[in-house]
Image: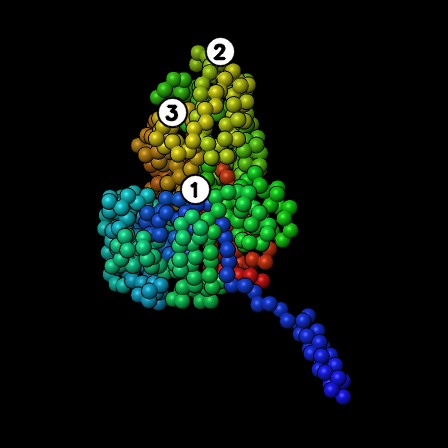
Amino acid sequence: MKVLLRIASVLAAACLSLAAGPMAQAAPKTELVATINSNVNFLYPGRGVAAEDYNFGMLVYNGLVGINEKLELVPELATSWSSDAAARVWTFKLRQGVKFSDGKPFVAADVTHTFALLADPALASRARSTAEMVDHIETPDDHTVKFVLKEPYGAWPNMLIERQLKIVPDGHSAEDLMKKPVGTGPFMLESYTPGDRLVVKKNPNYWEPGLPKLDKVTLRIMPEDAAKVAALSAGDVDILWNAPLESLKELKAIPNVVVDEAPTSTWDGFVMNNQVKPFNDVRVRRAFELAVDKKQLVQFALFGAGAPTHTPVPPNSPAFNKDISFTPDPDGARKLLAQAGYPKGFSITLNVPVGRPTRERAAVALQQMLKQIGVTVKLERVPYSRWGATIAGKSPFYMDGYLARPTLDTAIYPWYHSTGSWNNQMWHFKSERIDAVLDKARLETDPDKQNALYKTFQQYAVEDVPGVVMYTINFVTAYTSSLKGYHTHPYSWMDLRSAYFE
């Protein structure tokens, strides 16, 4: 009898196990692991200089204005904004009921404090020039901020999506925030081990109802591309951020992995110093522009993950001039060189940064394209650790590239206007007609009229040719297919507020 009872007990337990097995489902995980390429250098967003810093800022802080994956401005800590007729006084209504991660209410004084920090020369913030556009800030009440600008500026709300312009609490210095970040964002810092990982956890005071959906995010610092691809394939990480373009084919072959590309206005190009022979002759610069097959460069340098462009205006912008051809003209280029006194071409050295693979590949292709017009190019590869000190702004002919900017004005004016900061460092270019159209565009508040001005600018740029912008580069992430609510962002940061696992 005892034996029979024991058998019955075992059978009953087995039946219960079988019944429960197919029905029981593991709860979706609530912790995400993503890769980043290097350390986060600055936990205070105003000091951010690299994409890793900006990713941390996106997780822990908010700006007054945000930008979504479609490059549309969206309210964040400001719910609305408007300007006077001259676009010099901008009034922002602040979101009520928001708290910082330490429980302190968000008010207008925090905005004033944020801009005061950014304007401090000792801080050396990349956003200092933006903060210095402000003459003063008025705060009529705790939930209203008025920016009184030194000069009218029609795109001021767009400027506030700048990566360093995250709002920090009044009473906290930059040094304090470097050690203990306090923001209004969806997450807050849990731990940071440089060289290994940075961990953030859910901010219990976050203001968007039901968000974030994740409890924790770990950013693993993984500089080696092969290691990142292997970790994603093995399921050790959920998001491979900034996927290497040369690995796209391999990533697309991994089961249950999504490869997601976002067009951006980040660009690569080559710099020609307009003050130095042979580039002081516009005919030589035009010849180089005509010799370049930008569509081929996209395939060779980017493996198709990008688009040819004429200037930093990206092809997906409503201001892009579609009437300008990308068809190369080697015969026209040779005629221009002959007119400039180089009927047999010439030889020149092109400096190329080591560790920037898109530019390295583009340089090899450019070498062959210029050979067709009689220009012999010697490639000189320079380690990126020495690039700023020895090449950038010094070499007469070199490859370079720049991240997307928040407005067309900030993407163009510094490079193409005769007074522009990057122009004066790089190609030392001056065109009175380009100066005039850019001055007019930065004051225009009507989007259609502004777009028309920028289309005119692009036509002038391919005729006056300060330097050659080759293409814009897609930003790519790869992630596990069980991750939902996440999309690759054109500004290269990870917006994980709505991300969850299925």
One can see residue 218 in this view: yes
Label 3 amino acid?
Answer: Ser
- In front of the other: 187 or 73: 187
If the image is split into quadrants, where does the N terminus sit?
bottom right
Location of mark 1 (residue): 404
Q: Dividing the picture into quarters, in which one does residue 401 lie? A: top left
Q: Which part of the image, by quadrant, shows the C terminus?
A: bottom right
Real-space CA distance between mark 1 and mark 3, rounded to the nearest whole angstrom: 24 Å
Do the CB atoms of the residues marked 1 and 2 lie less than 8 Å apart? no
Q: Is residue 58 left or right of residue 228?
A: left
User: How is the rendered protein coloured?
Assistant: rainbow
- Mark 1 against mark 3, which lies toward the viewer? 3
**Which residue is disc 3 drawn over?**
395
Q: Earlier in the sequence, mark 1 or mark 3?
A: 3
Residue 441 image position (x, y, % from top left) = 37, 39
Whole-percent x, y for residue 225 in the image: 53, 42
Residue 449 in the image: x percent, y percent? 41, 41
Residue in front for this viewpoint, 453 or 126: 126
Which label's residue is closer to the chain start, 1 or 2?
2
Which residue occupies 40% across, 53% down?
Answer: 193
Q: Amino acid at mark 1?
A: Ala
Instruction: Tell me the distance, in whole angstroms, between the alpha carbons under discs 2 and 3.
Output: 25 Å
Q: Secondary structure at mark 1?
A: loop
Indicate the position of residue 226 as horizontal and vertical percent values. Answer: 55, 43
Q: Which mark is residue 343?
A: 2
Identify the element where label 2 is drawn. loop
**Residue placed farthest to the front in the image?**
2
